[in-house]
Image (spheres, grey):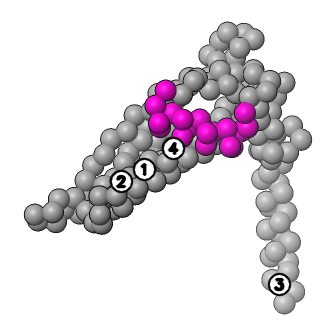
């Protein structure tokens, strides 16, 4: 019993040493990047359905812009690939690959502070009625836009060019 307590104590000390050694800061802490970016990023106006879904998901994470310090422009591309082919029926499973290329500009300095891309994928089934397949496709596209928004927000938390006001 005493040995297991000592191991836990030593593991806790090791974790503490690692977090202080690498200047760990919680994203949503007082001076955290999550709080610094909340309401500070204005996204380019949405044009397509995917754009609208992405902007909505991104604003759910980082809030609507109220003190616009950064402008985010983005391009979303998608590719669908069928899989699980059944003879005389076609693809029974479709995979949607999405890529979001982004650029963040500091509005005060008029300089690009971050850019890059995030990508992910999702799938949907086509084995039911046309309406069910269409609904599944729309749901998969919505999930993909949410996944891309979460991936972008996570990436922006670690960008050194984006700082607190």
Residue lying at the far bottom in this picture: please name it: 1
Residue linked to disc 4: 145
Determine whether label 1 and label 3 are within 8 Å by CB.
Answer: no
Q: Secondary structure at mark 2?
A: helix
Q: Residue at x 67, y 31 (%)?
A: 159
Name the spot of residue 163 as percent of width and height, x first.
77, 27
Q: Residue at x 76, y 32 (%)?
A: 39
- How many angstroms separate mark 3 from mark 2 (CA)? 59 Å
Circle number at residue 3: 3
Q: Earlier in the sequence, mark 3 or mark 2?
A: 3
Q: Secondary structure at mark 4?
A: helix
- How many angstroms separate mark 3 from mark 4 (CA)? 49 Å
Q: Where on the picture, by quarter, is residue 3? A: bottom right
Local crowd size for mark 4, using a 10 Å CA cut-off: few (<14), some (14–19), many (≥20): many
Nearest to viewer (mark 1 / mark 4): 1
Residue linked to disc 1: 138
């Amino acid at each position: 019993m005493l040995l297991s307590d000592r191991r836990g104590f030593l593991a806790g000390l090791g974790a503490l040493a690692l977090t202080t050694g690498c200047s760990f800061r919680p994203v949503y802490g007082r001076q955290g990047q999550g709080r610094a970016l909340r309401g500070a990023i204005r996204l380019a106006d949405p044009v397509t359905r995917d754009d609208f879904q992405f902007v909505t998901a991104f604003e759910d994470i980082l809030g609507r812009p109220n003190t616009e310090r950064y402008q985010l422009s983005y391009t979303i591309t998608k590719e669908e690939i069928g899989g699980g082919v059944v003879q005389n029926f076609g693809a029974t499973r479709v995979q949607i690959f999405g890529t979001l290329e982004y650029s963040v500009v500091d509005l005060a300095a008029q300089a690009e502070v971050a850019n890059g891309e995030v990508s992910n994928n999702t799938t949907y089934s086509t084995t039911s009625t046309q309406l069910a397949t269409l609904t599944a496709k729309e749901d998969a596209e919505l999930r993909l836009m949410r996944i891309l928004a979460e991936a972008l927000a996570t990436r922006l938390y670690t960008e050194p060019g984006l700082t607190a006001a």
